Amino acid sequence: MPRHISEHPGSGPAPGRRKFLILAGAGVTGLAGAALFGAAWLNPAVGQRMARLKDRAAFHIRDRLTPRRSPAELAERLFAPDDALVIGPAGPGLVEFINYNCAACKFQHRTLTALRQEGATFRLIVRQKPKPGTTSELAARAVIAATLQGVGHRLHGLFMDHPGTLREEDILALAVKAGAETKRLEADMSGPMAAHWLDNDADLAWLLRLVHTPSFVTRTEAIEGVIGQERFYGLLGLPTPEWGFPR
């Protein structure tokens, strides 16, 4: 089920308390890291549980240090077309945070495609939320690099239509199929522009406290999870078509 994200920003701690939280957080993280290393060495299952506890502690510390922001406050960054792939020439904007190895994202892509086939006009701003160090990050970098060549929308579609997990060889083969120039693509995948776009998208997702993919953001709300076709018409402020059935 989609999960709504609160639109009301939190208030950050006072400077003195902020300093204390930073020092405490560093201490907790250090102790947790030492415990994690020992636990993982003795028992991998215990190590995995310790890792989850460490991540949870780090999340709560960062949550206190960085106030949550509302979509309205971040609208200028979210809907800026010069730092993301934009699909669609006109209409209301809809931001989607995706992972190219996310099965739910691929399912949602079919819904968005069906909307366009029904005549819905909107601009989809694609923002990346890959798992760092995995092929989903390579795929995100490839789409960013392909966008710089003007073929990002083609590669995005090919990745979304690809069954199963994308491997490195799949990414390069589909980039060629999309019309990307290989040498420039590989250079731009590891270049500063790809790093900047990924960092910016990660920061936006964090400020909105979006954890899962797909996640959608309008100018007034942020929602995690798969959304039904009819719901999109309301989010986009578009009239719902009258579906008729032949007698």
Image (tube, grey):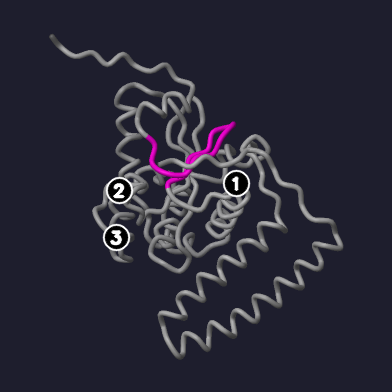
Q: Residue furthest top?
A: 247
Q: Are marks 1 and 3 in contact (CB under 8 Å)?
A: no
* Mark 1 → mark 2, Cα distance in angstroms: 28 Å
Residue bearing the label numbered 2: 158
Closest to the observer, 74 or 59: 59
Q: Is residue 184 left or right of residue 202?
A: left
Quarter where residue 88 is shown? top left
Task: Indicate whether 137 appears above or below 88.
Answer: below
User: In 3D space, how far apart are the residues under numbered discs 2 and 3 (Cα atoms)?
Assistant: 13 Å
Q: Give the residue furthest to the left.
A: 247
What element does badge 3 sit on?
loop
Q: Who comes first in sequence, dot 1 or dot 3?
A: 3
**Residue holding disc 1:** 208
Q: Nearer the viewer, mark 2 or mark 3?
A: 3
Residue 66 placement (x, y as % from top left): 70, 55
The span shown in magenta is 214-227
